[in-house]
């Protein structure tokens, strides 16, 4: 451990030597005008994280978008995946099955933080659809993965295929009461497919807000679309409390979700001959025979945050988080007698400690810290769990030459211990047991940033980072070769322009040069004896992706234009995402959409309010089948009958697009097809505050 600790400290010490000559400057210039946040809602507020927070971002980090509670209510998403899909630079791959939805930023996986607790990739994919959007205070999308204080560089298991995390989704559940003199809010809605949601939330404070306490509950249920097997029920409880004094802050949160969920049936995409449903792929246009159900799927999560301000310069923070998801899968299909199908238990569990200390002077902020994240996963049908633990240390330094110009540098080193190895497949299709107690090579990231407020209108930023990420031992590789570590150079520029309240612009072009990226070389469906590889969960044939190392480039940009018109009665935001990967393969794997356009409009007049959200995603290939290529529109209209009572009507995907984002088209002998959106849904909601 000593050697890689020294490697991490040296670049930060060098950075301090570089910065020292400028420390003695007197800076008395007026602070520059702040640009408007990337939101449409007039009521929404964005608050800068304190330097003690692990979510504090340097000024040079431009690729960030925050949706507040008001924004979420305006978008009218069905679930968190809808929010991800409408956000700049993000994409969703819906597949159902054991891992429900995948989330990506700029072509790679992202990490999810819920109420300050790091969720492992598999757990996040399982439960993110069960987090009630009505119980979220804010969701922040950080597309810049070189922010090193939030979470580990590498994922657990094979979740990222040996690539570093490409950003974070930070979800904060409700902790504040309604925006009114009242501390309690009840909400109820009814929508298509017999979908009911009812919730209550209350928040109170005492002693001039030194003590705070909030609690909430939501019941969600839906029958789902006939024959689609997509019904669900869920009960969610929240509790948050805190103490705040001049030198000490403490807070704690508890999240518990008890749910059951049917796994939506895919619609076949195979056009050849088949012996379905006895065997073979699902024919095009036919509902797949698998009618899986998770009952229960329960998640509990709690976090404790402590912060001590020793004086004006020194601050120490400690975070502890723990979470667990337990689920039982019933892998039914249309040919089975449900009474003969036994449940298969699964578990995901993680634990996290994060200790950081910040030293702040007039012009400089140095933050050093360490993080330990543990993970355990026991998949359905498996008796041997996989358990890993990541140890990380980091340091980041921010120096302000004056109020308009700052630079930053950071470094992080992670090292992983394989506590229990679990199992993997060799390229021959043979399953083997991995060793316990092994250590991986270190993962590194070094980043540099620069932010300059040129004048009250223009602001520019630039960032560079270098990642070195080892190859996970669970990957199946060509000829079982040991693949070299991935090396990734990231370059990014941010441009902001604040011409007026009516017209503001943000542009974030980026370029990634990746050496030894892990790319799909094909799939195998049989072992050396010619026997099909069987998925232990379904008992049916499956395939394994085989990886090799190759070089690739990724580049693109995200652009946002926003403002308010007609004396602030009309707000708008237009988004454009462009993404290119030089090595995408839509035959042996999935591509990502090259273009995505979005628009958000709101209108307010007196007690009336209306919102519209438009999203277009360009076509792309998924295992040889075209997905994407859709336009959706969400609309809502609400009226405040009094300060206490509001009613809204809404429509989601009113263009009735039954679009898909992923094709489960491998292997051909077990092609499930595409998980499609249900199309247009409509509903009504009542909110009462007291």
Image: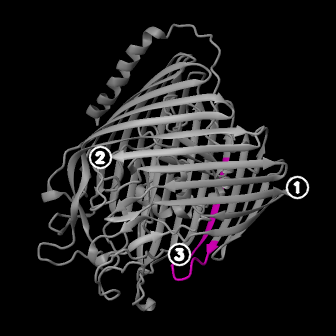
Please tell me in which quadrant of the rendered image residue 667 appears: bottom left
Looking at the image, is mark 1 or mark 2 earlier in the sequence?
A: 2
Image marks 2 and 3: residues in contact by CB distance under 8 Å:
no
Q: Quadrant of the C terminus?
A: bottom right
Q: Is residue 393 above or below residue 579?
A: above
Residue 33 position within the rendered picture, expressed as x and y whole percent measured from the top left = 65, 23
- Can residue 99 be seen by looking at this rendering? yes
Looking at the image, is mark 1 or mark 3 earlier in the sequence?
A: 3
How much space separates mark 2 and mark 3, taking CA atoms? 36 Å
Q: Nearer the viewer, mark 2 or mark 3?
A: 2
Q: Secondary structure at mark 3?
A: loop
Residue 612 position within the rendered picture, expressed as x and y whole percent measured from the top left = 66, 54
The label on residue 582 is 2
Q: Is residue 460 above or below residue 646?
A: above
Q: Nearer the viewer, mark 1 or mark 2?
A: 2
Q: Using residue 21 as the reference point, say whether residue 137 is left or right of it.
A: right
The label on residue 230 is 3
Q: Secondary structure at mark 1?
A: loop
Choose between 215 and 21: the one closer to the eye.
21
Query: Residue tagged by mark 1?
Result: 642
Q: Residues within 10 Å of mark 3 (few under 14, many from 20)?
A: many
What's the magenta region? 221-241
Magenta segment includes 226: yes
Choose between 496 and 344: the one closer to the eye.
496
How many numbered discs? 3
């Amino acid at each position: 451990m000593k050697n890689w600790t020294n490697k991490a400290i040296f670049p930060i010490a060098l950075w301090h030597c570089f910065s020292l000559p400028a420390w003695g400057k007197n800076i008395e210039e007026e602070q520059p005008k702040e640009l408007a946040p990337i939101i449409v809602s007039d009521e929404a507020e964005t608050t800068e994280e304190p330097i003690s927070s692990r979510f504090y971002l340097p000024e040079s980090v431009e690729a960030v978008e925050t949706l507040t509670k008001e924004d979420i209510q305006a978008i009218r998403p069905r679930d968190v995946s809808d929010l991800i899909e409408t956000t700049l630079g993000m994409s969703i791959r819906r597949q159902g099955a054991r891992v429900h939805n995948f989330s990506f930023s700029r072509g790679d996986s992202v990490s999810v933080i819920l109420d300050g607790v790091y969720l492992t990739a598999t757990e996040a994919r399982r439960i993110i659809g069960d987090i009630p959007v009505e119980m979220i205070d804010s969701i922040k999308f950080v597309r810049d993965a070189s922010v090193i204080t939030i979470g580990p560089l590498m994922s657990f298991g094979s979740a990222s295929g040996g690539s570093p995390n490409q950003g974070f989704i930070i979800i904060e559940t409700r902790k504040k009461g309604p925006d009114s003199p009242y501390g309690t809010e009840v909400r109820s809605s009814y929508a298509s497919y017999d979908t009911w949601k009812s919730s209550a939330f209350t928040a109170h404070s005492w002693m001039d807000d030194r003590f705070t306490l909030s609690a909430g509950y939501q019941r969600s249920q839906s029958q789902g679309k006939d024959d689609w097997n997509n019904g669900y029920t869920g009960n969610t409880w929240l509790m948050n409390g805190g103490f705040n004094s001049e030198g000490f802050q403490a807070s704690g949160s508890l999240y518990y979700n008890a749910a059951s969920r049917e796994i939506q049936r895919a619609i076949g995409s195979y056009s050849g001959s088949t012996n379905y449903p006895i065997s073979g792929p699902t024919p095009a246009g036919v509902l797949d025979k698998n009618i899986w159900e998770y009952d229960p799927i329960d998640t509990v999560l709690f976090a404790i945050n402590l912060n001590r301000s020793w004086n004006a310069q020194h601050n120490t923070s400690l975070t502890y988080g723990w979470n667990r998801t337990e689920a039982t899968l019933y892998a039914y299909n249309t040919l089975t007698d449900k009474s003969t199908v036994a449940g298969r238990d699964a578990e995901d569990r993680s634990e996290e400690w994060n200790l950081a200390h910040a030293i702040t002077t007039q012009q400089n902020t140095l933050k050093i810290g360490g993080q330990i994240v543990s993970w355990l996963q026991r998949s359905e049908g498996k008796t041997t769990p996989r358990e890993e633990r990541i140890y990380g240390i980091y340091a980041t330094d921010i120096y302000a030459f004056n109020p308009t110009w700052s630079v930053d540098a950071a470094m992080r080193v992670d090292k992983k211990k394989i506590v229990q190895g679990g199992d993997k497949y060799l390229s021959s299709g043979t399953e083997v047991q991995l060793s316990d107690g092994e250590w991986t090579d270190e993962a590194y990231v070094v980043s540099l940033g620069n932010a300059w407020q040129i004048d009250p209108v223009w602001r520019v930023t630039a960032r560079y980072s270098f990642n070195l990420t080892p190859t996970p031992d669970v990957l199946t590789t060509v000829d079982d070769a040991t693949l070299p570590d991935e090396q990734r150079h990231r370059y990014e520029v941010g441009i902001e322009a604040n011409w007026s309240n009516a017209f503001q612009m943000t542009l974030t072009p980026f370029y990634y040069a990746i050496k030894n990226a892990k790319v799909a070389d094909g799939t195998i469906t049989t072992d050396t004896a010619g026997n099909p590889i069987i998925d232990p969960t379904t008992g049916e044939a499956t395939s394994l992706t085989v990886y090799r190392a190759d070089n690739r480039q990724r580049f693109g940009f995200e652009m946002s234009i926003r403002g308010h018109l007609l004396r602030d009665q009309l707000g708008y935001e237009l988004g454009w995402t462009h993404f290119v990967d030089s090595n995408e393969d839509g035959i042996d794997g999935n591509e990502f959409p090259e273009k995505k356009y979005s628009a958000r409009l709101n209108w307010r007049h007196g007690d009336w309010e209306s919102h519209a959200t438009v999203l277009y995603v360009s076509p792309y290939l998924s295992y040889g089948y075209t997905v994407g290529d859709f336009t959706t529109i969400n609309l809502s209209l609400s009226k405040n009958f009094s300060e206490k009572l509001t009613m809204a009507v809404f429509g989601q995907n009113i263009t009735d697009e039954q679009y898909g984002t992923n094709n489960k088209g491998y292997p051909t002998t077990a092609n499930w097809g595409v998980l499609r959106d249900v199309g247009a849904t409509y509903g009504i909601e009542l909110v009462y505050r007291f």
